[in-house]
Image (cartoon, rainbow, N blue to C red):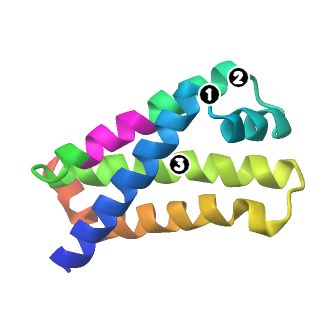
Amino acid sequence: MIIVSIVLQSLLILAFFFSGISKITGAKMQVETFSHLGLPQWFRFATGFIALAGVIGLIIGFWNEAILTIAALWLACIMLGAVLFHIRSKDPINKMIPAAVLMILALVLASLHLSSLTDLL
């Protein structure tokens, strides 16, 4: 289980780091996607920083399991929003698959460490 968690955590760090950076720097694909979804460009910029905050949480999660769980849930919520915006835009399913897969992977990672949240209560 530890290996699976570390692999998932590492994959999510990479995926959200590069996605967040591309949103912040205004990569053409990101600009076009946010325009297509009917979202303002400031929201693209904000979403990039929100994703990078999740990346920081995942990195801290190598030492703190509760932070890892919260960060994974945070990123899953971001991806749920992405899926919902694709649905609202009536996009074909293949356009929302990347967001859905990242959401599922983040939820799997969170579920592997969910018991760590009881330590916070």
Q: Which residues are magenta?
A: 51-58
In this figure, what is the number of numbered marks?
3
Can see residue 121? no
Mark 1 vs mark 3, foreground winner is 1
Mark 2 vs mark 3, foreground winner is 2
Q: Are marks 1 and 3 in contact (CB under 8 Å)?
A: no
Label 2 to label 1: alpha-carbon separation: 9 Å
Q: What amino acid is found at the position of numbered circle 3 in the picture?
A: Cys
Q: Residue at x 81, y 40 (%)?
A: 37
The residue beneath circle 2 is: 41
Residue situated in front as seen by the camera: 68 or 39? 39
Label 2 to label 3: alpha-carbon separation: 20 Å
Q: What amino acid is found at the position of numbered circle 1 in the picture?
A: Gly
Helix, strand or loop status at disc 2: helix
Membership of 57 in magenta stretch: yes
Q: Quadrant of the N terminus?
A: bottom left
Where residue 27 sits: x, y (%)?
A: 62, 34
Q: Badge 1: few (under 14), some or many (20 or more) residues near its Cα, within 10 Å? A: some
Q: Is residue 53 left or right of residue 87?
A: left
Q: Earlier in the sequence, mark 2 or mark 3?
A: 2
Where residue 84 sits: x, y (%)?
A: 73, 51
Q: Earlier in the sequence, mark 1 or mark 3?
A: 1
Where residue 108 sits: x, y (%)?
A: 40, 70
The residue beneath circle 3 is: 77
Q: Is residue 3 left or right of residue 37?
A: left
Q: Main secondary structure of the magenta part?
A: helix
Q: What amino acid is found at the position of numbered circle 2 in the picture?
A: Gln
The residue beneath circle 1 is: 26
Helix, strand or loop status at disc 3: helix
Q: Residue at x 16, y 75 (%)?
A: 2
Q: Are marks 2 and 1 in contact (CB under 8 Å)?
A: yes
